[in-house]
Amino acid sequence: MAVETTSTSRIAEAGAHPGQFDARTLLYLWISGVFVTCLLLANILGVKLFRFELNAFGSQIPIEHTVGMLTFPVTFVLTDLLNEYYGKRAARRATYVAFAMGVLAFILIMVARKAPILTGIPGTATQESFENIFGAAALMYVASMVAFLLGSLLDIFLFGFFKRLTGGKMVWLRATGSTVVSQLFDSFVITFVFFVVLQRVTGGEPASFLFVVKTALTGYVLKFVISVVLTPVIYLGRWMIRRYVGLTPLPATSSDA
């Protein structure tokens, strides 16, 4: 109580309300909030698959993946913005928080699956439909969380590496380069964990190495296209942050860049 009173007194002496945050802190909270939301939605929406033909180099390439890919790449864009303005430690902090919230969501979903169901109410799910959605996605959820954590940490490292390498110039290189490499790693991790590791743990039949490579590369094509398309979003985000918040990116020589 004494510590809380002392902290409140210091804030009051500084002329700020205890619940008031500066623009830099508010921006970090908002980006982190969107970051967590995109991750959770990517895992929840991942139970639905889609397929389309991509015309590339004169041939039709079939693209098959989950609709979770519509929100998951956004997490890499937000990671880059956090890295750009707050440094790698702040970006890692948001990653750890998102991962922890993903684990919490997984636990709550498991509890919900075990709860006794009340049927016959219009607009509510049956046990079969509820289990079909959340039960079938349990293993993929675990694989996705592992891939997210490792891929995001790699993205943060590569972003800082390219920023120092280019002296803070060529934003497109560090944004797209770090994302392209980290998502290639992410694709192989999630495919290997789901089709090999978790299948062995649960007594299933692990997939062949050729299948893992083919599936990972197919998904990566989509991630690569999305990462390139989203590159202008980094520039837009930088402009908006400078225009409306007044922040400038950390210099490449910063120890936390």
Image (cartoon, rainbow, N blue to C red):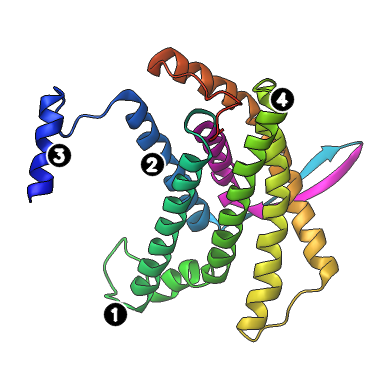
Pinpoint residue 221: horizontal percent, then vertical percent: 76, 45
Instruction: Characterize the local packing of mark 2: few (<14), some (14-19) or many (20 or more) Cα atoms within 10 angstroms.
Output: some
Instruction: Characterize the local packing of mark 4: few (<14), some (14-19) or many (20 or more) Cα atoms within 10 angstroms.
Output: few
- Judge by depth and name the residue closer to the eye, 136 or 26: 26
Single out the residue that lies furthest toward the top: 243
Specify the quadrant of the image occupied by residue 241.
top left
- Residue found at x 25% / y 29%: 21
Q: CA distance from mark 2 to mark 4?
A: 30 Å
Which comes before the other along the chain, label 3 or label 2? 3
* Amino acid beneath label 2: Gly
Q: CA distance from mark 2 to mark 1?
A: 32 Å
* Amino acid beneath label 1: Pro
Picture disc at residue 116: 1
Pinpoint residue 251: horizontal percent, then vertical percent: 56, 23
- Judge by depth and name the residue closer to the eye, 74 or 246: 246
Residue highlighted by disc 2 = 33
Which comes before the other along the chain, label 2 or label 4? 2
- Residue found at x 77% / y 52%: 218
SS at badge 2: helix
* Amino acid beneath label 4: Thr
- The stretch of residues the image draws in magenta is 58-83
Q: Is residue 134 left or right of residue 57?
A: left
